[in-house]
Image (tube, grey):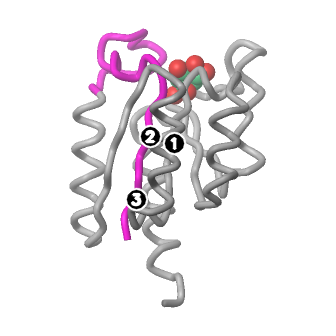
């Protein structure tokens, strides 16, 4: 099995993008830590970032037939706008965890609504880069406890 980590728009700029809000870790360093954690659990962690909706949707579609067992997704601004990306996750039916670096509930009102949370297995928000690591722990333990 594989765990797919998806990052939405502007997350390629992590490290320099509003560091007070999003921290100073780069996306590459976050992805590397996740891959190392996966390796210790014997699970491949694949990562993908796009600034556009279509490539994210197509990557979700591909997950249906590439052994992906769980998806961890930070939809970034698409959290609050994208019915299309939500529908893609509903279509493939793979369990997913929604992640945010910032606590979206402590920010502008428009960030409180998510098109993903009601479909997600769970949501982790507010712990910076560690939000991804907490989500990965949850996915790994769900995978480990799943009857074969
Ligand atoms: C974000 C929160 C979103 O509201 C914002 O548009 C992002 C990042 C987060 O990780 O905190 O781009 O998803």
Disc 3/disc 1 C-alpha distance (Å): 11 Å
Q: Secondary structure at mark 3?
A: strand
Tell me, yes or no, whether the highlighted magenta stretch contains residue 23. yes
Residue 73 is tagged as 1
- Residue 89 % position (x, y): 63, 48
Q: Are marks 2 and 1 in contact (CB under 8 Å)?
A: yes
- Residue 117 % position (x, y): 72, 43
- Residue 122 % position (x, y): 65, 53
Q: Earlier in the sequence, mark 2 or mark 1?
A: 2
Tell me, yes or no, whether the highlighted magenta stretch contains residue 2. yes
Q: Residue at x 55, y 32 (%)?
A: 75
Query: The magenta stretch spans which residues?
Result: 1-26
Residue 3 is tagged as 3
Decide: is 124 above or below 140. above
Picture quarter with ligand 1: top right
Q: Residue at x 48, y 28 (%)?
A: 8
For label 2, the crowd category at 10 Å Cα-Cα, with few meaning under 14, some 14 to 19 and many 20 or more, is many
Query: Which residue is denoted by mark 2 in the rendering?
Result: 6
Q: Earlier in the sequence, mark 3 or mark 1?
A: 3
Disc 2/disc 3 C-alpha distance (Å): 10 Å
């Amino acid at each position: 099995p594989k765990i797919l980590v998806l990052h939405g728009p502007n997350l390629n700029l992590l490290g320099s993008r509003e560091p007070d809000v999003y921290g100073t870790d780069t996306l590459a360093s976050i992805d590397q830590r996740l891959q190392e954690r996966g390796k210790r659990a014997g699970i491949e962690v694949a990562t993908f970032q796009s600034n556009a909706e279509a490539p994210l949707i197509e990557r979700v579609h591909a997950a249906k037939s590439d052994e992906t067992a769980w998806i961890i997704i930070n939809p970034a601004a698409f959290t609050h706008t994208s019915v299309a990306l939500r529908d893609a996750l509903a279509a493939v039916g793979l369990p997913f965890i929604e992640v945010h670096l910032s606590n979206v509930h402590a920010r502008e009102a428009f960030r409180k609504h998510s098109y993903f949370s009601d479909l997600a297995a769970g949501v982790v928000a507010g712990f910076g880069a560690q939000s991804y690591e907490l989500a990965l722990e949850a996915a790994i333990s769900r995978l480990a406890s799943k009857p074969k």
